Image: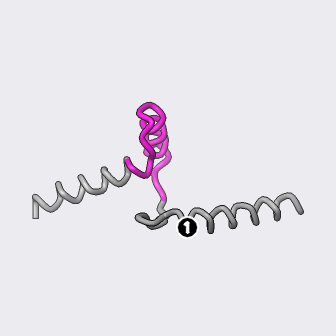
Amino acid sequence: MLFTTMKYVILVLEDYAMADRLKNRIRFSTTLDKKTVQLLKEYSDKTMIPSSKIIDVAIQEYIKNKEKSL
């Protein structure tokens, strides 16, 4: 129980420390299909591009394509 509590405290502290470093980014949470997450992870590992960057580009491209059809 103590180990679990300590682990939680460490995670919370790391989260606060990371928040200070996220100057141009906002923490965002969502859910994805399991297969989509697996594809994202495999592509990220293969290309060494962070998942967050892949998601940034994918969303921007999606919106550009959708706006063309409006």
- Residue type at mark 1: give it: Ala
Would residue 62 be counted in the magenta stretch? Answer: no
Locate residue 5, reporting x and y percent: 82, 64
**How is the structure coloured here?**
one colour
The 10 Å Cα crowd at callout 1, few under 14, some 14 to 19, many 20 or more, is few
**48 vs 55, nearest the viewer:** 48
Vertical position of residue 48 compared to residue 26: above or below: above
Q: Is residue 2 left or right of residue 36?
A: right
Locate residue 52, reporting x and y percent: 43, 52
**31 vs 47, nearest the viewer:** 47
Query: What secondary structure is the stretch in magenta mostly built from?
Result: helix
**Label total for image:** 1
User: Which element type, helix, strand or loop, lies under badge 1?
Assistant: helix
- Classify the position of the C terminus by image quarter: bottom left
Vertical position of residue 4 compared to residue 50: above or below: below
Q: Is residue 36 left or right of residue 56?
A: right
- Residue in the image at 44% along x and 47% along y: 51
The boundaries of the magenta stretch are: 31-53
Q: Quadrant of residue 24?
A: bottom left
- Residue in the image at 39% along x and 50% along y: 53
Residue behind mark 1? 19
- Residue in the image at 22% along x and 59% along y: 63
- Classify the position of the N terminus by image quarter: bottom right
Locate residue 68, reporting x and y percent: 10, 58
Locate residue 19, reporting x and y percent: 55, 67
Q: Is residue 8 left or right of residue 45?
A: right
